[in-house]
Image (cartoon, grey):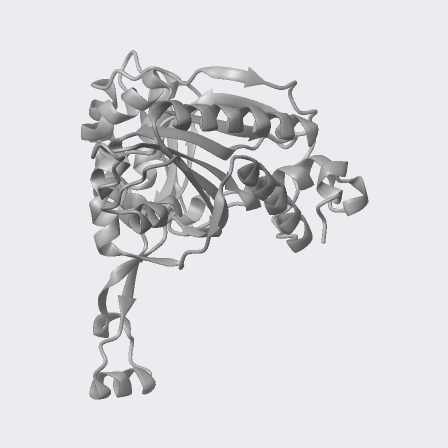
Amino acid sequence: MNGENNGVVRYVHRMPEGFAAHQTKLVADRLTYSVEGIHAIEPGAEPRELVVDIDADRVADLAVLDELADEVAGERLRGQRVVRRTDPAEPGTSAPARLDPVLHRALDLLFLDLCRAEGAIERAYPAVIERAVIDRCRYLALFPQNAYLVSELPHERALLARVRAGNDPAPLSRLSGYLLTPALCMHTYAEHADTEVRDPLAVTVIGQCFRHEASWRLSAHRVPSFTMREIVYLGDPGYVERIRASLMDTVWELFTELGLRGRLETASDPFYFAEDTPMRQFQLLSHAKYELVAELPGGETFAVASFNNVRDSLSHAFGVVDAAGAPVHSGCTGFGIERWSHAVRSMHGDDPRGWPAEIRRHCR
């Protein structure tokens, strides 16, 4: 442990012998959501080292690193597989964080065109979602680190008067029956819960999603509130896989046409607990999830789209069945609008005259 600087110390932790670099990264990912007071987590000088900047009074909490290392050591995960790749981006710098409403709107119109081409109907959903819906698909159990639970003040006159008088509302509030929406597709499953879907169905929606991120990780491409365009498709297994494959092809074509750089690779969801590792492994082995990853001139890499085939798991949870009473298969594809915008600005600048023609055609 190095010296203290403004109450923050640098702690160097070495993983067990035989630990691979990807295992060390997985420990770092879980540590992010396991201890408060962290300011940064970086790779060390050796593949087995992690360097953690943390508040001095929270150093003892880093004992959890041994537990996390034991968890990861016991997991046998297949690595991600790259299935398509562009040429690398030329060295340079990434764009500063800024939301351009014209570019934001143009990108969404592009994605909306792709969704309409697959026969999707449009929907609009609220920014909050009922806890009962979240519990039905076990989101809190699987991804508790990302959830934003909504609090409320009881409708009691004396209590409200205390808030007006300047008292701290936190101890006076209670949890409501809502969460901020973490994924738009949950609204679609809730809309069709306990119903029969006789014909293939595709639904598209744009809206805000909310994920609780560690404050030190926030950046131009990682924010707690972001805009998603999603398309959810429900039907027989062949229909779901056909739509997903079609979208992967057309989105990859668009990605390269826009002059962006990156790769399409197999991926898995960010399950927090080791007990859920079999689901992560299943996603990787069965190619249930692909991510389109942008690579920027400044060295940033992040997913800008995901393509998911969840088979009958969510339809089973929500009681969405076919004419024979069996759970339908389903999938979804999501586009992170702010991330696409950041990638375009990093590659082509802020002047719309320098943006690709396909984007300029959709500028309003």
When the figure is inspected, residue 18 is found, relative to residue 41, above or below; the finding is above
Q: Is residue 356 visible?
A: no
Residue 40 percent location from the top left of the image: 42, 40
Total count of labels: 0
Residue 84 occupies which quadrant of the picture? Answer: top right
Q: Which is nearer the eye, 194 or 41? A: 194
In the picture, which quadrant includes the C terminus?
A: bottom right
Residue 46 occupies which quadrant of the picture? Answer: top left
Q: Residue at x 33, y 86 (%)?
A: 164
When the figure is inspected, residue 169 is found, relative to residue 273, above or below; the finding is below
When the figure is inspected, residue 33 is found, relative to residue 331, above or below; the finding is below
In the orientation shown, which residue stands out farthest toward the top? 18
| 88 relative to 122 in the view: left or right | right
| 254 relative to 199 in the view: left or right | right
Q: Residue at x 25, y 49 (%)?
A: 134
Q: Residue at x 51, y 42 (%)?
A: 336
Residue 239 percent location from the top left of the image: 41, 27
When the figure is inspected, residue 83 is found, relative to residue 215, above or below; the finding is above
In the orientation shown, which residue stands out farthest toward the right? 353
Residue 338 percent location from the top left of the image: 56, 46
